[in-house]
Image (cartoon, rainbow, N blue to C red):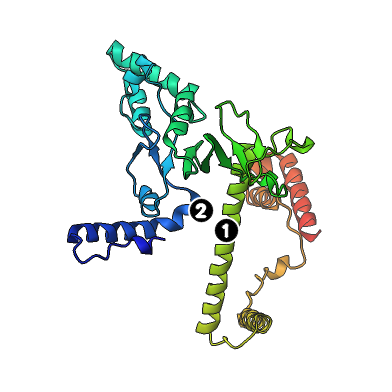
Amino acid sequence: NVCNDVPNDQNIPEGVQLNYEQNFMDAMQILPKLPKGLDVNVRFSGVSDFEYTPECIVFDLLHIPLYHGWLVDPTDGPSLAAIGNCSYNQLVDKIINNKTSLHPQLVTDALIAEEFLENSASQLTNYGLQELVNHLKEQELCVLFRNNHFIVLYKHKNQLYQLVTDQGFIIENNVVWETLNNIEGDTQFVDGDFVLVPPKPALTTPVVSQQQIDQDYLVALSLQEEHKRQIETSKEWDQFKHESGMEGLTDEELAKRLQEEEDKRYAQMRQNEEQQPQPQPQQQPPHLRGAVVHPNSQNISLQQRRSTNGSSEDSENDGSNKSKSKNVSLIAIHLIEY
């Protein structure tokens, strides 16, 4: 209980009191982030070594030990020298920067550190596992950070047990704990009294993969976000009804009222369109009404005018031209009448 740990002694230094109050306020801001995870940054030097982040305050205030087993074996001199006291984030930056360095030793250290991360991708080493066994007290309950997840860890008779939380075991009432005695994942299941539970046919294969667990987690987050959007939409709908003076109406009555107003606006728009003056059709000349003008009639008329208004000298000298002009004129008149 956090309240029982509040410094209330009048003789306590004011600085300690203020520091506790500040930590408490910081922790209250972090609690809403718990469903989405916390940001922790391990150091490879000890099971309880983490780079300080505001998220660590929650564990400190609640007196919950936070451990990890991602440690460098002290007998591995090259890896120990390459990693030093770096945190995970610092080591990644170091590898990226030094792999392209002009100094051979920096490049070598970067490659050794990168190999260490690849070989310990499960975020647990044999040396780290042994350190956990040595560090935890008998019947100590704590939290283990591994594979970017937080796992409830318990020590019973010098043996480490992880709390089983996989959804595949939700109907297995006898399965409570899972042994953690190697880094290869070869484990056994026990009940609440730490008695071995015989494996069932359904449990001989991995019940739920880590990928499936992550997918289920993402689905849960998606459903949570969808629920929030539904709540926001409902609030916006209530606010709209309040602002429009329709707060007392049911959703069905309000929808009917809105449809009636929409019908009125549409009817008014149609009425305005009908009242606008319609454009008058263009009148044709009297001599062309009811006639279809041939596309080449203008050219024919020009030929006709040229033929009829030609010089008298050409008329007299070429009788055949008169005949052709007469024929063209007849064709033009026939097409216009047609």
Q: Is residue 100 above or below residue 18?
A: above
| Mark 1 vs 2, N-terminal side | 2
Instruction: Answer whether labels 1 and 2 touch (C-beta < 8 Å).
Output: yes
Residue 157's place in the image compared with 71, above or below, is below
| Residue farthest top in this picture | 104
Quarter of the figure that contains the N terminus: bottom left
Quarter containing the C terminus: bottom right
Q: Amino acid at mark 1?
A: Gln
Quadrant housing residue 49: top left
Residue 312 horizontal side relative to residue 127, left or right: right
Asked if residue 293 lies left or right of residue 282, the reply is: right
Q: Please, what is the three-letter code of the amino acid marked with disc 2?
A: Pro
- Label 1, label 2: how far apart the Cα atoms are: 10 Å
Q: Give the x, y percent position of residue 23.
A: 30, 56
Q: Is residue 107 visible?
A: yes
Residue at image position (61%, 46%) is 165
Q: Determine the secondary structure under disc 1.
A: helix
The numbered dot on residue 224 is 1
Measured from the top left, where is residue 228 in percent x and y? 55, 63
Please tell me whether mark 1 or mark 2 is closer to you in this view: 2
| Residue 62 image position (x, y, % from top left) | 40, 54
Name which residue lies at 68% across and 81% down: 252
Q: Nearer the viewer, residue 133 or 166?
A: 133
Q: Residues within 10 Å of mark 2 (few under 14, many from 20)?
A: few
Q: Which residue in the structure is indicated by mark 2?
A: 35
Residue 111 visible, this orientation? no
Q: Secondary structure at mark 2?
A: helix
Q: Quadrant of residue 80?
A: top left
The 10 Å Cα crowd at callout 1, few under 14, some 14 to 19, many 20 or more, is few
- The location of residue 13, given as percent across then percent down, is 18, 59
